[in-house]
Image: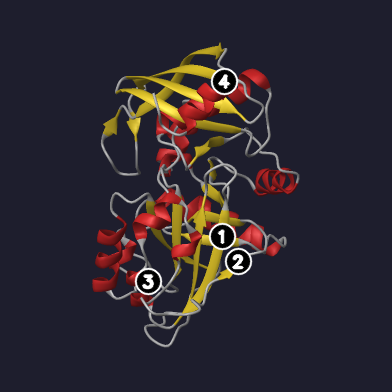
Amino acid sequence: MSTCATASRDLSEPLAGTAATAPTWLLLEQPGPWGTQALTASHLDAAVGRALERAAKDTGVRVALIRRPGRHADLHTGARHRVFVAHTRPGRTWIRTTALDDPGRLLALDFAALGTGDPGCLALEPHDAPAPWEEYTGDPLVLVCTNGKRDRCCALLGRPLAADLTASGVHGTWEVTHIGGHRFSPTLVVLPHGYAYGRATAQGVKDVLEALRDGRIVTDGCRGRSAWERPGQAAELAVRELTGEDGADALTVVRTEGAAPAWSVTVTHTDGRAWQVSVAQVASAPPRPESCGSALGSPARMDAVGVRALRLPAHRIRALAAGRP
């Protein structure tokens, strides 16, 4: 059976620069079946789902549904929903969690503040004191895309991976509704750092988690860090390839200039080094399906076509990081 994932793998389609952009993730547990647009096609109240989509729009917050791997009871009422909020920018990563009977209470959150990484804004109602949020101290969250209603590859490849990880003791494993890139299935994102991976294997995920325990990342199979837009994701990975840097929070994308099909991206290191990366958007060839059953297309990919070391004084790097010219 030909699938979009098979075509992408056979064509050796690059993974860098293909992760979803999400500085902050809001994850809501919702057991039961998921439709193509899961926030409005599941047992979550559709009005709440639409309102969450509207509230998160253009804030830097990505809302997704999650559930534990395995068979899912087709429950409509009575379930208590585990909620996670995770921020992914280097040096500022965190996860907070709570449990709710009524997901509609999430609409009281300050989504704009969450998008900037401010955990102090977590309150479910204007006068909640204290808010029922706790710092999450468990294993990294491993979110495996399994929504077969969006693409069959996510179900055929993602669900077995999620089950294998859970069976082997990866306790932070959850199924997630959609993180983009069906053709790279099985695909996943690891929080709080926000690095996404494609064509994943159970052993590969364990290697990623082992590295993260030491504050390192694995670049093999990495699609990029969700904190950055796609050109920044490709630029960061290009600097890592050039330098061999594997510190999870060592690199920051401080500036992206230009527009499709060409960008200049500035990447800095915590030790004061900096690089300018030229990123080009090119059409993938030959044509291939971006999703199972879709027409053949030429999905855009991000190619780092040049990396140049910069010699900048510390005050200049600080200015770039602060968004000053």
Does dot 4 land on a helix, a strand or a loop? strand
Quadrant position of the N terminus in the picture: top left
The reply to whether dot 3 and dot 2 touch (C-beta < 8 Å) is no
Residue 78 percent location from the top left of the image: 42, 88
2 and 1 marks in contact (CB < 8 Å):
yes
Q: Which residue is identified by label 2?
A: 135
Q: Is residue 126 above or below residue 93?
A: below
Label 4 environment density (alpha carbons within 10 Å; few <14, some 14–19, many ≥20): many
Please tell me the numbered disc located at residue 274. 4
Disc 1 marks a residue whose amino acid type is Ile
Residue wearing tag 1: 95
Residue 14 is left or right of residue 206, and the answer is left
Q: CA distance from mark 2 to mark 1?
A: 6 Å
Instruction: Calculate the distance from the C-alpha at mark 4 to the C-alpha at mark 2.
Output: 33 Å
What amino acid is found at the position of numbered circle 4 in the picture?
Answer: Ala
Element at label 3: helix
Whether residue 156 is situated above or below residue 257 in the rendered picture: below
Could you tell which of marks 4 and 1 lies nearer the N-terminus?
1
The amino acid on which the numbered mark 3 sits, given as a three-letter code, is: Leu
Residue 279 x %, y %: 42, 19
